[in-house]
Amino acid sequence: MKMDRGGERDGRQNDAPGEDFTDDAFLGGRLQALQPRKGFRAGLDTVFLAAAIAAGEGARVLELGAGAGIAALCLALRTGASVMGIEREPWLANLACENARRNGLAERVAFACADALNYRTDRPFDVVMANPPYNDARHGTPTPIAKKRGSVLHEGGGIAAWVKAAHENLKPGGAAYFIYRADRGEDLLRALATDFAQVLWLPLMPREGEQPRRVIIRARMAPAAPLRRVEGFVLHGQITKYTPQAEAILRHGAALDLETGQTGSAIT
């Protein structure tokens, strides 16, 4: 399996597009998307972030750091939201646009080539979502591919810069969603403390009783409230590859209710 910033891929690999890209199926084949053969590839983290977004019909969603567009497209398949993805690499932004077209979602999902951390709009969004890089210069050395794309090591202010970009593109009362390394989740909480409130924390545990490796955090621009930690979501069974709840999200496009840690209806 390829890895997605530490998460497992959900998708079948098809090498037909050529030596630079693979053509992968997500959500049980409901989404077919091209992505780079090397470097960061969409997987479990991507799909779970999209599943966690609460966005109603007509909601406007911004994704910071869209890559090949797979999180935005997974969200659009499940909801009636319109999604704008920001990706700083022109070739990836073009690839994301192609993925939107080939899945019939180009009317509701668009991508722009820009630096996500410096992107600002005069039409704030209802929701901002991001799968930020997990490491910074204190914790490792980038690979050549990662250094070129800037998608492993935090640049220009670390996680605080991602939080600032989310805040400055949100409507009052809007919500920001992040998926992040659980062992650095406190760094994200500190960054959120200045401008956000009503923070909800849902850990993703590999197996029952194990320490979480990822956490999904939702924060609102709303009156202050205590941090709420929801009981963890278990990904893998002791015998089965995935729990039925995780399978519902990965294979059937079910929503993940952050308030309860339970899955909702699947895509029909």
Image: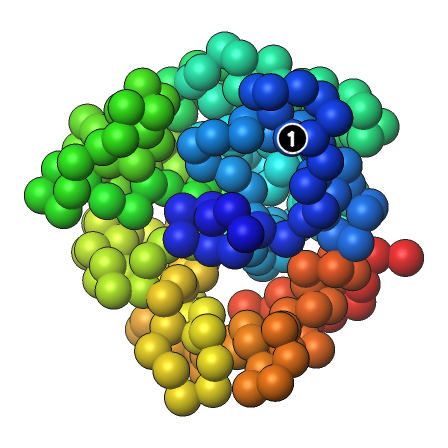
Amino acid at the residue labelled 1: Thr
Front residue of 237/82: it is 237
- Tell me the residue at 14%/46% (across/down): 139
Local secondary structure at mark 1: strand
Q: Which residue is mark 1?
A: 22
Quadrant of the frame with the C terminus: bottom right
* Viewer can see residue 94: yes
Where on the picture, by quarter, is residue 214? bottom left
Residue 143 is drawn in which quadrant? top left
The answer to whether residue 19 is above or below residue 70 is above
- Name the residue rendered at 37%, 42% in the picture: 132
Where in the figure is residue 216, as x and y percent of width and height?
A: 44, 61
Q: Is 229 on the left or on the right of 103, as rendered?
A: left
Q: Is residue 164 visible?
A: no
Q: Is residue 33 left or right of residue 135?
A: right
Q: Residue at x 40, y 25 (%)?
A: 116
Total numbered labels: 1
Place of residue 251 in the rendered image (x, y in percent of width and height, measured from the top left) = 74, 60
> Would residue 164 appear left or right of 8 to someone viewing this image?
left
In this view, 4 is above or below 89? below
Q: Quadrant of residue 13?
A: top right
Q: Which of 154 and 169 lies nearest the eye of the viewer?
A: 154
User: Is residue 137 toward the left or the right of residue 9 in the image?
Assistant: left
Viewer-nearest residue: 3 or 202: 3
Residue at the spot x=81%, y=24% of the render?
102
